[in-house]
Image (cartoon, rainbow, N blue to C red):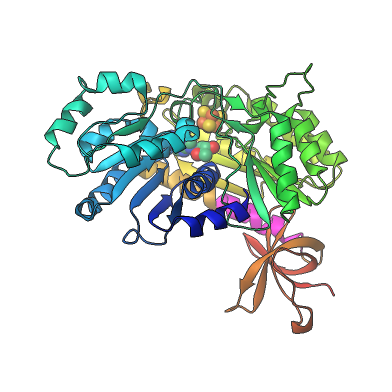
């Protein structure tokens, strides 16, 4: 996180360069910030293009669709660059999921590393630099022994004509209790930043690859999270977003006797760090979502009045098939807590349509749930079968055209709901964080505590600074945003 340190190292070692492209969720984006910080600390310099880089890295996502195919296509495109002495690494969920198969299909790749092994990156980088070009140099001791016999091992000898044949893997850490703790995080936004509080997931929802790719749940101590929050506040950050696949199952390793905090207590404590004006958190699982979170939002004004609570389906039958561990009624109970909060809490969600066996009646229950809750935004997905997941074995797949139809119906319904909901804010003054300027529209880009986009005009004499907080009165609404003018 120490940007000063990163700058010093950038100038100290200009010879090793890397290019990193990131796909996927906020967790991946933040992992990349930590990977970049680690590389820079190890003497690498980040560059903007593949052509300028010695080391090319992809931080991949496999949550939906045929992500692995896309990664292999991308890698194939860049194979020709191997002759220029460039090295390639695949990080993230596709790396963990495909493992050593990546070396077989893309023999020019030297490093395959899942997120649970990132804390070992410095050692892997040294090995990458030191390894003899023809010798398989594995980081996972166990897998290096087995590799000689494995199909991937045969891939090595088949591809031995390739000049830089180094094989480094970080794939065996999914059972670890340790998190990727690093003081070298290269945050790009100077006002708003992520902090990971929990890694992995133990929920095993039937459709989801995350427990297989990110490994078992492990939390950082609240002391370490708070130290990072204080450091960020000292550097001038005012907004913090706490991250985890399921932040609600946060479990402080310090334990109750050691002064450990619950998630709600940690949230409140981050909100009370001097200098921090906004705290968000994502993502929540309804099963673990406690009323104490709402009590914390009520008690601490810096905690944003927004909760993202993925529901996935409004039908109990589907929720059970998805192994979501809650019923529609229990989900709605949590929504009722939010609606009883002192401030109006904006609620958003994720929904999957076309899970195997979803009938028209099940789908209609999801539609009625949208009406009942009144979300401010919903991320909608067509179910896609993913490797290793329990739902692969389910019958009654829904044809793709039907999934597409349901998705359209769902999105149209949600759009109507949002049109009505956003209209209510016309005439209301909200504080926004200024995120930037849209010159073509002559507007500033703002974000409310509820996470709504509120773009606005301001007199030239009172132009706000990016990162500052200003009051804005909304004067028009759209399905996804508001427009207004700064109150001077
Ligand atoms: N198919 C479709 N959507 C999925 N998601 C996760 N796995 C799948 C899948 N196999 C969606 C869920 C989750 C969001 C991050 O991605 O809605 O909440
Ligand atoms: Fe996937 Fe379910 Fe874990 Fe979320 S809670 S990451 S959907 S398994």
Quarter of the image where one finds residue 339: top right
Q: Residue furthest front?
A: 12
Residue 78: percent from left, percent from top = 25, 53
In the image, residue 119 lies at what x, y percent? 50, 33
Q: Nearer the viewer, residue 105 or 190?
A: 190
Q: Quadrant of residue 123?
A: top left
At x 64%, y 64%, the residue is 478
Depth check, front residue: 478 or 203: 203
The magenta region covers 412-425
User: Visible in this render: residue 386?
Assistant: no
In what quadrant of the picture does the C terminus appear? bottom right
Give the left or right position of residue 444, taking residue 353 as reference.
right
Q: Is residue 463 above or below residue 90?
A: below
Percent x, y of residue 88 = 31, 46
Q: Which of the pair 242/384 is nearer the observer?
A: 242
Query: Could you tell me what secondary structure mostly forms the magenta stretch?
Result: helix
């Amino acid at each position: 996180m120490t940007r000063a340190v990163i700058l010093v190292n950038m100038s100290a070692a200009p010879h090793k360069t890397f290019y990193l492209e990131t796909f996927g969720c906020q967790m991946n984006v933040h992992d990349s910030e930590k990977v970049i910080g680690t590389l820079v600390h190890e003497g690498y310099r980040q560059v903007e293009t593949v052509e300028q880089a010695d080391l090319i890295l992809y931080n991949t996502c496999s949550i939906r669709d045929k992500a692995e195919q896309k990664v292999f296509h991308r890698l194939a495109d860049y194979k020709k660059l191997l002759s220029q002495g460039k090295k390639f690494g695949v990080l993230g969920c596709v790396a963990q999921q495909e493992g050593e198969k990546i070396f077989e299909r893309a023999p020019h790749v030297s490093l395959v590393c899942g997120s649970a092994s990132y804390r070992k990156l410095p050692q892997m980088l040294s090995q990458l630099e030191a390894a003899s070009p023809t010798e398989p140099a594995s980081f996972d001791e166990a897998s290096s022994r087995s590799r000689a016999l494995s199909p991937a091992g045969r891939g090595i000898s088949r591809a031995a004509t390739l000049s830089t044949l180094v094989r480094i893997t970080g794939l065996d850490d999914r059972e670890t209790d340790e998190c990727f703790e690093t003081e070298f995080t290269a945050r790009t936004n100077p006002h708003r930043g992520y902090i990971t509080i929990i890694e992995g997931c133990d929920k095993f929802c039937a459709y989801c690859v995350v427990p297989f790719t990110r490994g078992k749940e492990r939390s950082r101590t609240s002391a370490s999270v708070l130290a990072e929050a204080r450091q960020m506040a000292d550097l001038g950050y005012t907004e913090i977003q706490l991250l985890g696949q399921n932040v609600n199952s946060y479990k402080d390793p310090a334990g109750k006797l050691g002064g450990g905090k619950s998630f709600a207590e940690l949230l409140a404590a981050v909100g009370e760090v001097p200098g921090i004006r906004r705290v968000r958190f994502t993502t929540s699982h309804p099963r673990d979502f406690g009323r104490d979170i709402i009590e914390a939002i009520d008690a601490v004004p810096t905690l944003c009045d927004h909760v993202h609570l993925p529901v996935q389906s409004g039908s109990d039958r589907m929720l059970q098939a998805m192994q979501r561990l809650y019923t529609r009624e229990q989900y709605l109970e949590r929504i009722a807590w939010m609606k009883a909060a002192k401030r109006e809490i904006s609620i958003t969600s994720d929904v999957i349509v076309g899970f195997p066996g979803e009938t028209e009646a099940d789908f209609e229950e999801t539609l009625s749930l949208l009406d009942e809750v009144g979300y401010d935004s919903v991320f909608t997905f067509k179910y896609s079968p993913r490797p290793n997941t329990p739902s692969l074995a389910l019958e009654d797949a829904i044809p793709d055209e039907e999934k597409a139809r349901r998705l359209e119906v769902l999105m149209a319904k949600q759009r109507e709901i949002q049109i009505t909901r956003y209209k209510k804010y016309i005439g209301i003054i909200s504080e926004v964080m200024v995120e930037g300027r849209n010159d073509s529209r002559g507007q500033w880009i703002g974000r409310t505590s509820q996470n709504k986009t509120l773009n606005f005009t301001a007199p030239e004499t009172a132009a706000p600074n990016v990162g500052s907080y200003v009051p804005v009165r909304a004067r028009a609404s759209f399905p996804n945003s508001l427009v207004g003018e700064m109150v001077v």
